[in-house]
Amino acid sequence: MSCLMIFGKKYMDEDLGLNELVKETMFIAARPNLGDYIPFLGVFDLQGLSRRMKELSKPFDEFLERVINEHLHKVNEQNQAKDIVDKLMGIMNSNEAVFEFNHHHVKAILLAIYYSNSTDTSSTTVEWILSEVLRHPDVMKKHQNDIERVMVIKEGFRLHLVAPLLIPHESVEDLINVWAIGRDPNVWPEPENFKLERFLECNIDLRGHDFQLLPFGSGRRSCPVMQLGLTIF
Ligand code: HEM
């Protein structure tokens, strides 16, 4: 599904070992790295996490080169929908970008989108929300119209976040624990309970303007695909 959305084709069927590559990368990325907590140990890479991550970059690079080559050589039929790779290569070839935008930038963006998508963000959230709905059939019976469906999604996101600490960007000085904010009794009365009514009494939105609920982060580095993420629901 991710491949189809981003590269226009299901590469998972081609036995390229992509699934394993993604799993291994997520496994390494999620491991606590001593060097992050005691910076002077970082250069020694005691757990070998940096080395393993660097090793993984080679097969990924080969895969992305292949995708780009296939797009360069594909015969463009009329009415054929353009995928993200076509769009990015269009920007690159137009020379209209006001910043440097070359082959490497195309690969970097494709990799970022692919990873964010392959971590199952949307499907994990759907699973959490459905399991809350199944656990609270009475709540769902009571609230069945469209507005209340929005409340289910907000309440689902409040309790189950894809990135509980958001992404630690280089410019960030403190980690933002959105998981703890979502369960802070000063903000949310009876925080452990799945209660849709709390959203009847307030206009809290989830697009990054209300800091009590930040499932997609906030500001310039918030999730660029928020709209797609929300459309899925
Ligand atoms: C329910 C679905 C999703 C949720 C809840 C979600 C949430 C997030 C969050 C919390 C961040 C970090 C924001 C920050 O650090 O402030 C993020 C970043 C990002 N997301 Fe999503 N995401 C979803 C779906 C997706 C999908 C489907 C894609 C790709 C197709 C995607 C692409 C990205 C990218 C590229 C970033 C990094 C942005 C940057 O570093 O500037 N997300 N997302």
Image: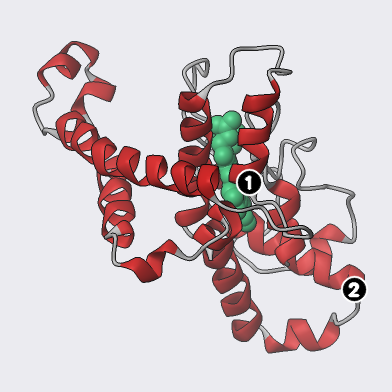
Residue 145: image x %, image y %?
A: 91, 79
State the mark number for residue 190.
none
Of the residues under marks 1 and 2, which one precedes in the sequence?
1
Q: Residues within 10 Å of mark 2 (few under 14, many from 20)?
A: few
Q: Image quarter for residue 221?
A: top right
Of residues 107 and 56, the one nearer the viewer is 107
Give percent across and percent down for residue 84. 63, 46
Amino acid at circle 2: Asp
Q: Position of residue 213 (x, y in %)?
A: 70, 45
Q: Is residue 9 left or right of residue 208?
A: left
For disc 1, the neighbor class at 10 Å (few under 14, some 14 to 19, many from 20) is some
- Camera-near label (1 vs 2) is 1
What amino acid is at disc 1?
Ile
Q: Quadrant of the C terminus?
A: bottom right
Q: Nearer the viewer, residue 29 or 228?
A: 228
Of residues 105 and 35, the one nearer the viewer is: 105
Q: Are marks 1 and 2 in contact (CB under 8 Å)?
A: no
Quadrant for ligand 1 reads: top right
Residue at point 56% right, 52% down? 74
Q: CA distance from mark 1 to mark 2?
A: 32 Å
Residue 84 got which mark?
A: 1
Which residue bears the numbered disc 2? 146
